[in-house]
Amino acid sequence: MKRYFRGAVSLAVLLPLVAAAQMPAPRKPTDTRPVTPVVPAPAPLPAPVKTPAQTTQQLRTHPIQSQGPAQVVPPAPPATTAPPKVYDRHGRIVPGMKQAGPNRVLDTRTGRYYDAVPTGDGQRIKP
């Protein structure tokens, strides 16, 4: 039994060595394609330098156009002139309420003022 075990172990060790010996050596990458020498790119030519006389001559031929003094533009009117909507504690629109100031609304029916918080497109009365 030991004889068979030794033979199997020696065969397992020698098999990869035999397989590696049959493989050819790795080829060089340049064996399959021709070698072409690298040709350096030609250097770019320097741009011509303008003298100060050429620059001032160019400025004289193209003066800056003037339209006179700056015109004052009137401010644009507000996008909406509708009063902000006022919502009650439950989120329903309350008719007849007007904004009296920041975070304050006036109930025109009763004449009472209420505290409010900004919500969406209007004010909401605080609970």
Image (tube, rainbow, N blue to C red):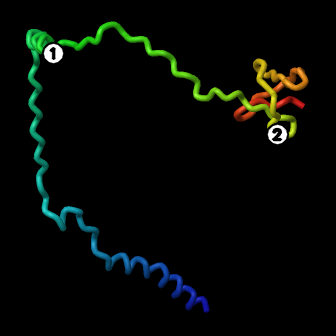
Judged left or right of residue 43, residue 11 is right
Amino acid type assigned to the residue bearing label 1 in the image: His
Q: Quadrant of residue 118?
A: top right
For the N terminus, give its image quadrant: bottom right
State the mark number for residue 62. Answer: 1
Residue 37 vertical placement versus 76 (above, below)? below
Q: How far from the left and from the top, in percent, is residue 98?
A: 78, 25
At horizontal 19% and vertical 62% (from top left) the residue drawn is: 30
Nearer to the camera, 26 or 115:
115
For the C terminus, give its image quadrant: top right
Q: How far from the left and from the top, in percent, is residue 43?
A: 11, 35
Judged left or right of residue 122, residue 77 is left
Judged from the image, the secondary structure of the residue bearing numbered disc 2 is: loop
Separation of residues labelled 2 and 1 (CA atoms): 65 Å
Between disc 2 and disc 1, the foreground one is: 2
Which residue bears the numbered disc 2? Answer: 91
At horizontal 81% and vertical 27% (from top left) the residue drawn is: 97
